[in-house]
Amino acid sequence: MVIVGGGFGGLYAAKALRHAPVRITLLDRKNHHLFQPLLYQVATAGLNPAEIAAPIRRVLRDQRNVRVLLAEVTGVDPKQRTVTSSAGTFGYDYLIVATGASHSYFGHEEWAAMAPGLKSLEDALEIRRRVLLAFEKAECCAPSQEERAAWLTFVIVGGGPTGVELAGTLAEVAHHTVANDFRVIDPTAARIVLVEGIDRVLPTYSALLSARAERQLQRLGVEVRTNARVTGIDAQGVQIGEERIAAKTVLWAAGVKASPLGQALGAPLDRAGRVKVSPDLSVPGHPEIFVIGDLAVLEQDGSPVPGLAPAAIQEARHTAKNIVRSIQGEERRPFRYLDKGTLATIGRNAAVADLGRLELSGFVAWLAWLLIHVFFLIGFRNRLLVLFDWAFSYLTYERSARLITGDGPKAAPAEPAPRR
Amino acid sequence: MVIVGGGFGGLYAAKALRHAPVRITLLDRKNHHLFQPLLYQVATAGLNPAEIAAPIRRVLRDQRNVRVLLAEVTGVDPKQRTVTSSAGTFGYDYLIVATGASHSYFGHEEWAAMAPGLKSLEDALEIRRRVLLAFEKAECCAPSQEERAAWLTFVIVGGGPTGVELAGTLAEVAHHTVANDFRVIDPTAARIVLVEGIDRVLPTYSALLSARAERQLQRLGVEVRTNARVTGIDAQGVQIGEERIAAKTVLWAAGVKASPLGQALGAPLDRAGRVKVSPDLSVPGHPEIFVIGDLAVLEQDGSPVPGLAPAAIQEARHTAKNIVRSIQGEERRPFRYLDKGTLATIGRNAAVADLGRLELSGFVAWLAWLLIHVFFLIGFRNRLLVLFDWAFSYLTYERSARLITGDGPKAAPAEPAPRR
């Protein structure tokens, strides 16, 4: 059988099949599993890439019924039961597709260059580069007060969990981490603006928790702009209807666009391109193909199963059991998502938690978030290192990975350089 | 005054001037100081970039007579006493140029794309990407036994310290770290070939230590080829005179080419472009300009001061004192390099050390190397983390940063993909 994708869905499906009588080929275009819930920490220079990523083949080293191949999957032929990839064509009897989702620019693909999103390690390093570079540019090279202010203005589009995390952490970076590192600029004067199209942040939480999250963001120094729809983004700033925010750094944390592989399956899709799966998570008409994780959409009790790591892991384990049942001639069981609660972090000592009947916010929610995320982080070594980095950051307000790598600053500016 | 470069020379000069009556502008095109002696550990996935790099402005945060600017210096005008850069033009009364050196391809610049060198964090990540990708390609996509062998052959050109470190560590990666991670290939069959043009590796050491280094390399599984001059490099391998080594991965660790900024000073240069400085490290005819570190060349007792971090640091401190002397109307003193001994690491438990009368090799030399390098690593936090990563690697043979980032594998291969 073939598993496409080494994220939470694909990796946990492979692990759950370790004692099953199957031979698994796991294909991913990256060599590493990424602990995406902490990706924003790499983007804000708090963690190193290797602390939230582990080589997939290392994780599955001792599971002899799996082979891992680094390959970009280009298509699926459900009739021939084959997967085509950069590493060749693979036949399958069972197929699990878990290639996830990315962000969507709502038809404005031209915004992508100005406002990078956060899905991969490369994305995170690009955001880190832009954020750190903005402070440097403000210090060295702003010819006017306006331009300096534009370099020190950071707009985050999208008030979901990623946008909230980025905004809260950027505020901490500006107002604490780099506060004393410059001579010309005052980083504590930096503006962090979080823009959300509807009337509250974290819309999947209760109105109460949304309000608390907004208050915590404001306490951290974030300007929260709800009911604000972005109508334009260019290299100099963001347009919100009539209003203009001059900003050199814009980050994108809105919209969902499913992996294009969903289309190849010939299954019904929703507007975001997600595959509408049967209750057993298989593709209608193709019981041998399962879609799990962010690429799948399944209604349950009137609302969709959320696109979160715990849901993907539950789906993976359920699918592994259903495959074993099918092999043994037993009947499959429908998937039931068990909501153990959701948490969103906002910043230092700030988070919200929805634990069913119990709603928490502030320090307690933040501590719960911290413990849970470190606990689930793959690999003992990574847990220890992340704890170390966090303790270090918490006590000192430092960020450990303040490196600008990749393309450096542009060579000579177009205008004649001022004499200093 | 102006300091160009935030490496060992520039950074330590700035630090040594902390109580001097000067106002310093330090310009560097990177935002971080790099602990270059450990760069090969990043290239071989043992350390994270942030563990061997620190933001320059963070290091100098509390030194109020320094401002740090991220800027690419494009020229120096010794007559006008100005430095031009991407961040503007800066006048100076004293100037320290410490922009270092890079590798040289001996006029074969076309080899650069095939055989990357190791000078920056970006270089290290590119080498890491290529090395890890080679194993993946051998596993997934080699249509023949020959091609698989070519993916599993790594040629390192240059038998100086960098080449020896890379070869020894790559042998450990192949023969231990990834030994059990693959299903098709046997990584322990990988060939690591170290090619050196003259008759021994580590030619700046004694013949005895060179011989011991070669023996230690062989014990680690490295093929050492001395008296072997590379005459061609292409995407399929390396030409050594009549002989051809089929290899998909070639790393460059030979040659020295000084930073081009040396030319702008109008000073006499040696063949590698290094500035021939006066005994006080100033440029002949320009006592207000100092050149230190790898960009400078100075004969002493018949041999040049070596291009090593300790030499750069000694030069930096000496220059700081001479500047203070000049300001106070005192006479400058000539620089004397104090050789406290040199060490080169080879791999696990393997190194050589030249401590003047005492020559060490093997485990003792390796331990000395380890302690000294961790001790000199900038920042308490980095020391602790590097120690942790090394202890982890030493005990488990794991490497903590096995990430392939950047450009992924090519999409579809040109030839029709085989059915698997």
Image: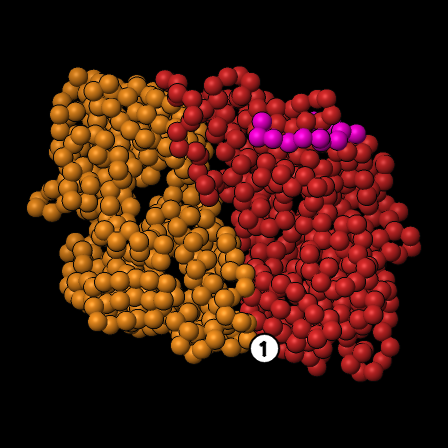
Chain colours: A orange, B red
As drawn, B281 above or below B304 = below
Residue type highlighted by circle 1: Arg
Q: Is residue B350 left or right of residue A141?
A: right
Residue B326 on image: x %, y % = 80, 78
- Of residues A21 and B317, the one nearer the viewer is B317
Q: Residue furthest left?
A: A302
* Tally of numbered discs: 1
Residue drawn at (55%, 75%) of the image: A418
* Residue identified by numbered label 1: A420
Q: Chain of mark 1?
A: A
Neighbours of disc 1 within 10 Å: few (<14), some (14-19), many (20+): few
Magenta stretch encompasses residue A125: no
| Quadrant location of the C terminus of chain A in the rendered image | bottom right
Q: Which residues are magenta?
A: B222-236
- Of residues B358 and A92, the one nearer the viewer is A92
Q: Is residue A111 visible?
A: yes
> Which image quadrant for residue A173?
bottom left
Residue drawn at (39%, 35%) of the image: A29
Label 1: state its secondary structure: loop
- Of residues B176 and B252, the one nearer the viewer is B252
Residue A107 on image: x %, y % = 23, 51
Q: Is residue B416 left or right of residue B162?
A: left
Residue A270 on image: x %, y % = 15, 42
Residue drawn at (17%, 63%) of the image: A198
Residue B80 on image: x %, y % = 70, 75
- Of residues B368 and B334, the one nearer the viewer is B334
> Which image quadrant for residue A315?
top left
